[in-house]
Image (spheres, rainbow, N blue to C red):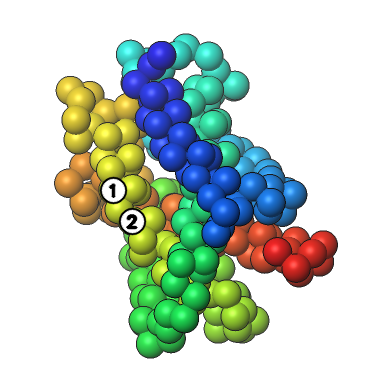
Amino acid sequence: MSLYFWIIVISFIGPFLLSFDKRVAFYKKWRYIFPAILPIALAFIVWDDYFTENKIWGFTPEYLQGIYFRNLPLEEVLFFFVIPYNCLFIYDVLQAYFPTVKLVAITKIFAVYFALSGLVLTTWFLDNWYTSVACSVSAILTIGLYFIYKVKWFEWFAFAYLVALIPFLIVNGILTGMATENPVVWYSENHIMGLRIITIPFEDLYYNYALFLPIIALYEFFKRKFGKG
């Protein structure tokens, strides 16, 4: 298997096996999880394909299986299903094991940061497609869900996002060249601000945020509409 495929498989094994943990019983929520992931994954695949076609980012063939869907390798398509599944798993595990945690103050700071920084970076780097799109989407989602609709679950989303930063730094670090001669995923310097967390473009923080947040929103919607969760 390719390096990228191994990363996807290893990332998925733990959360999948632990989905059957009695306390979390994550497998019982699959009927909400997959409908929540699918539309957002498809939207991100379209975004990803467009950016790849326009060479805003791309993939190093030596780390891939060689199977493509339009411009995207199979591994990249799987990324948009596996990583959201893992993030939802973290989201549910935290609620199961830390039900009394209160992060109101931290959540407010978290939301203000992503709303303001997203707007500022979008304006400042308007010509950098990755920066402007990832940051603007993050800002708009935060303003809508936290400040306008005031969704109650946003505190858990913030908690899960911060915890997920640990595996995020490992996975994205490997993908962006932390442990390889060439990066699995490369980025055009013309479309990023240039600030990196070791090898990870700073924009990836906003990209993952923009991926995770609407999936949580749909997940919570389906739980309310079709069951008690």
Residue 211 percent coordinates (x, y): 52, 53
Question: Residue 176, image x and y in percent?
Answer: 28, 36
Can you tell which quarter of the image residue 183 is in?
top left
Residue projecting furthest to the right: 226
Q: CA distance from mark 1 to mark 2?
A: 6 Å
Q: Is residue 215 above or below residue 2?
A: below
- What residue is shown with label 1? 169
Q: Residue furthest front?
A: 22
Which element type, helix, strand or loop, lies under badge 1?
helix
Q: Residue at x 44, y 40 (%)?
A: 14
Q: Nearer the viewer, residue 150 or 156?
A: 156
Q: Is residue 79 left or right of residue 177?
A: right
Residue identifier under label 2: 165
Q: Is residue 203 above or below residue 143?
A: above
| Residue 83 visible in this rendered orientation of the protein | no
Judged left or right of residue 226, residue 129 is left
